[in-house]
Image (cartoon, coloured by chain):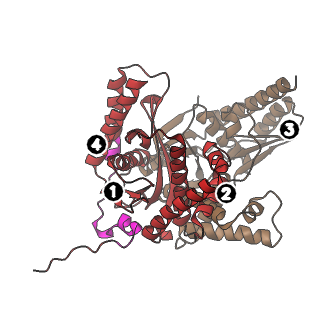
Chain colours: A brown, B red
Amino acid sequence: MTTFTLRRNTPHELNELVRGAPDALVALTEDHRRSLSARFRAVHSSDHRRLDAWSVEQAGRTSSSFRWSPATARRLLGNAALRRVARDPTCAPSESVTAEIDDQLLRCASGYARGGSLASWLASLGASDLALVGAEATNWLVQVLEIAQGLEGEWRVATSDAYYDVASARTTLRARKDLEVGVGDGRVTLRVRSGSPGKSAGPGLRSDLTIDTLANPHGVAPRRFIGLWPEAGVVLSVDGTMADLRAGARDLVRTAVVQQRRRHQSAA
Amino acid sequence: MATCTDPSPRSVVEALRGDRRRRPRVDYSSAPGLRSILEDGIFSLFENTAPPTPFIIRASSLRQQSTSTDIALSAQARVRGILVNHLLRLLSVGASVTDPFDDALRAWRLEARSGDLLDFVERLSGDDLARLATDVTAHAVTLSRSLGPVSPRWMARSAVRATQILCNGSVILRDVVDLMVGTTVGEVANVALFDVTTAPLGPGAERTMRYHALVQTLRSGVVPLRTSSFSTATGEMWSLDVDNELLTRSAHEVLGALANIAQHA
């Protein structure tokens, strides 16, 4: 039975959620990984499958083709700029976003950027476009920074999202994460999201928990995985228990099954 | 006898920030009470029957109804408003704006890509486009002259969205604040909300200012320091310090707007 907790997004409530995370550390073993791999292999796929919380929430619907926009670039730029602010607190949010954009442009100018990358997209923009991208990224940075500054525990910006390739199943799982808080010898992971949580936000969050655990080299689960919706002012959390990890894995496999069924139906 | 008065602020941003020493302690306690006022009011309005589709309240729901029936004029005014707002976003991150109309239009196109209003701009004749450009430039000059430099340290963010779901989704409050400065973290109230309109300020603007403060309080649990509205048509700025009385008044205005909408639904 999954224990979702819904709270208001205030520093007090958030710190309570971090402090109240379960004490026991749960870890996934090689047997768990093998079992998950077997389940995904059983769901045939002709091409490479990519699953994340969004696909779980959308019941396996695939997203339309990706394109860069101020909205899709803000998290990447905002989190990178937040790392600068965390390293050097004297650096102001909008200045660190500008520095990050300049770095991306430099990468492109020196020939290190691939076609279709964020750097090459930014290099194709005019000055006013770049300013708008900067404004969006600053919005993201400030909202994550406000959350982080309200935390009592030691926090850090997640170095990257969690990726896990399921062995021999042509499947990649991805969990987005923005902040990590150290709690004892474990961690609490936070993910910031836009908009308001929908009815399937819980299963999405649970799949993030499972993927974050699978991507951990030792298979150790975060004590709690917290999703924050600052626009709506709410916080939803799921505990890092074995029952929740299993439920998250089931949600992901079920999504793969639904996706496969949809493909068959559209091919027929 | 000599009387010392406060010096007038040199810019809109300076007026928004005000005197740091006079800021009240941050208020975390008002939000739950305001939510109760709203939810109790909604409950008595619908008498236990949840509406089949949620009622959505926006800042525009609280403004007076426009009497204008000219759709083209109305679209032009909306386009002007969007472009001036995009300009504010550019100015908020310290961008140097050389051609206000072109810069704002480029930024809007990058964000929106398509839409009825963008199509409207694409369909404008050369003369109409030139008129729109002149109009936007005039508003932009008023804005950029009055705004003043936005310090990077003030945590300025633009087009900040908020959504509040009340009574299990029966009513949804939606809002977008054009510019927000200050942080919710700290001992004293810090957050200033800034709304830009291309229309002259009227009673509707006051309700909008209160609504922004209410939704931000519900969203963050923290009462903002002040809420302001600036007209690029007149260069006038209204500013209200936010307190519980102002927020309670706004909650009742929301309930009034809701009753009005429910009556006509």
Task: Left or right? Give the position of A111 relative to B4.
Answer: right
Check disc 3 and report its element: helix, strand or loop.
Answer: loop
Please determine if labels 2 and 1 lie on a single subunit: no
- As displayed, is residue A56 above or below residue A78? above
Q: Residue visible at 87% across and 30% down?
A: A44
Q: Residues within 10 Å of mark 1 (few under 14, many from 20)?
A: some
Q: Name the quadrant of the C terminus of chain B.
A: top left
**A265 or B26: nearer the viewer:** A265
Q: Name the quadrant of the N terminus of chain B.
A: bottom left
Give the residues drawn in magenta, as a range.
Answer: B9-32
Please determine if labels 1 and 3 lie on a single subunit: no
Residue wearing tag 3: A169
Q: Residue visible at 34% across and 71% down?
A: B9
Residue wearing tag 2: A76
Residue wearing tag 4: B249
Q: Earlier in the sequence, mark 1 or mark 4?
A: 1
Q: Measured from the top left, where is residue A70 in percent x and y?
A: 65, 55
Q: Chain of mark 2?
A: A
Please determine if labels 4 and 2 lie on a single subunit: no
**B261 or B210: nearer the viewer:** B261
Residue wearing tag 1: B26
User: Contact (CB < 8 A) between labels 2 and 3?
Assistant: no
Q: Residue visible at 75% across and 47% down?
A: A66
Please determine if labels 3 and 4 lie on a single subunit: no
Q: What's the amino acid at mark 2?
A: Leu
Q: Chain of mark 3?
A: A
